[in-house]
Image (tube, grey):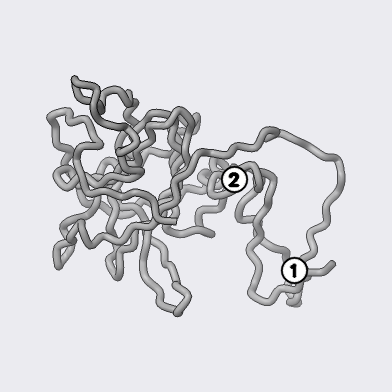
Amino acid sequence: REDKVSVMGAARKKKGKKNGKKKGSAAPSSSSDSLIWNFVPQAGPGCHIARSGYSCNKDDWVLEWEPVDPADYKSEEGEGDADEIPDLAIDPEEQTLTLCNIKTEPVVAYITVHSGNKETTLIGKSGTPLETGTSTDQDGRTSRCTTLIVLCPPQTFAHLCYINMSSSPPLNLNELQVESDVQVWNQHEKVHDFHPQTVGFPLQITTDEEGGFLCTQGQGGHLTHFFSGNQHAIDFQCPRGTPLLA
């Protein structure tokens, strides 16, 4: 779905400083990323995961996690409504993309920024470009995009990344195409639930080669498997047309 996206600077408390952007080459995904996120990064090119305070500290592309007090957004007369703060805000001065969570619960955001034919639209901390992937619509048109999967703590502004404005022709923020789904995190009640039954996956090998199927995301994978309805799901990478056996 489309959530509230605003081109504004009011969602950020100004600190009187400008962060300079640096150009650089995209950093390759390390082999340890799949262990950290329980997800194979090569299976989702252009997807970038961020969680505040995660012990493995692999969300180092995020600019800043800023704690906020909703009361700060009311006037001295008590006017103003924190609910008017958008889910996503683009600061035209600092050229940053921010996820705004003023709720008392953590939220999960899936944010996709379409970049057309541009190689780099989003730039992380230290000037590292965020790798792009591709998206194909229902009419078969393919374009480049970057998707951010963010688990944001309560009452926090996640200043995610810079928007690359140095493209040719220059990027117009008002024309930036952003799709987002922001919702309160519906966490599974029994994350470590276990059942002793043996499960056989109904996938048939159709080639003469030895093999199997690459597991691209395991239980609790931080790409999509951390909700109540799919905490214990498992993803396999299979060729199109692979038979499923009852």
| Disc 1 crowd, CA 10 A, few/some/many (<14, 14-19, 20+) | few
Q: Can you name the residue that lies furthest to the right here?
A: 197
Residue 132: quarter of image: bottom left
180 up-or-down from 114: above or below: above
Residue 15 in the image, given as x and y percentages of width and height: 17, 28
Amino acid type assigned to the residue bearing label 2 in the image: Gly
Q: Nearer the viewer, residue 169 or 61?
A: 169
Residue 73: quarter of image: top left
8 up-or-down from 14: above or below: below
Q: Nearer the viewer, mark 1 or mark 2?
A: 2
Q: Quadrant of the N terminus?
A: bottom left
Residue, disc 2: 221
First in sequence: mark 1 or mark 2? 1
Say which residue appears at 54% left-offset and 40% top-offset: 36
Amino acid type assigned to the residue bearing label 1 in the image: Glu
Task: Give the CA distance from mark 1 to mark 2.
Answer: 27 Å
Say which residue appears at 30% left-offset and 39% top-offset: 84
Task: Label 1: state its secondary structure.
Answer: loop
Residue, disc 1: 210
